[in-house]
Image (cartoon, grey):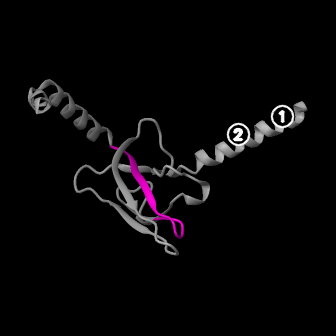
Amino acid sequence: MSPIMRNFLILAICANLGAMIAAADVVLGTIDPEDMVVYSQNITMRKIPGRVQEALVNYNPWFAKPVISGVVAENRRKDKTLNEEPTLEIVKGGIGEKSIKLKVKSQEGKGMRVLVKVFGKYSEGTTKNIKTLQKKLENSKVLDKIKKY
């Protein structure tokens, strides 16, 4: 096999693998390393021939509301292919807002097994309060009692 043909074959294999990996997740927005997962929801639906499956994801907390920076829909199917990834549609709220309502759709005739994660940033005051509460919990004996059960 000539070096040119070998390089072309390697490039084709890498492109195919890249397409399969890209088919795994759908991302909306920009997620920074310091962003936290503020909400997650599993969606599982069986396939129905000829029908598109839909599910609503609603994140609207009544307590400390972070600013939403991104949403990831992880395709959890074992047989991931490029044409089976779910689609996301923002119905209400969205990136840069404090709430979001999403419509997750499967491809026609396909089921869904998706983990939807909403990422956000809390204000500095809220982050400090959360970290203070976490430290208090870590220092208290409540966690030790919980771990025993």
Q: Residue at position x 87%, y 37% from top?
A: 5
> Which residue occupies the foreground of this view, 98 or 109?
109
Residue 57 locus on image (x, y percent) = 36, 61
> Which residue occupies the foreground of this view, 72 or 112?
112
Residue 115 locus on image (x, y percent) = 40, 51
Q: Residue at position x 58%, y 51% from top?
A: 23
What separation in Å lies between label 2 and label 1 (alpha carbons)? 12 Å
Q: Amino acid at mark 1?
A: Arg
Is residue 64 one of those drawn in magenta? no
Mark 2: give few (<14), some (14-19) or many (20+) Cα within 10 Å.
few
Q: Quadrant of residue 60?
A: bottom left
Extent of the magenta region: 105-122
Identify the image quadrant of the C terminus: top left
Residue wearing tag 1? 6
Q: Amino acid at mark 2?
A: Cys
Residue wearing tag 2? 14
Q: Is residue 124 left or right of residue 95?
A: left
Q: Quadrant of residue 91?
A: bottom left
Q: Is residue 21 left or right of residue 145?
A: right
Residue 88 locus on image (x, y percent) = 49, 61
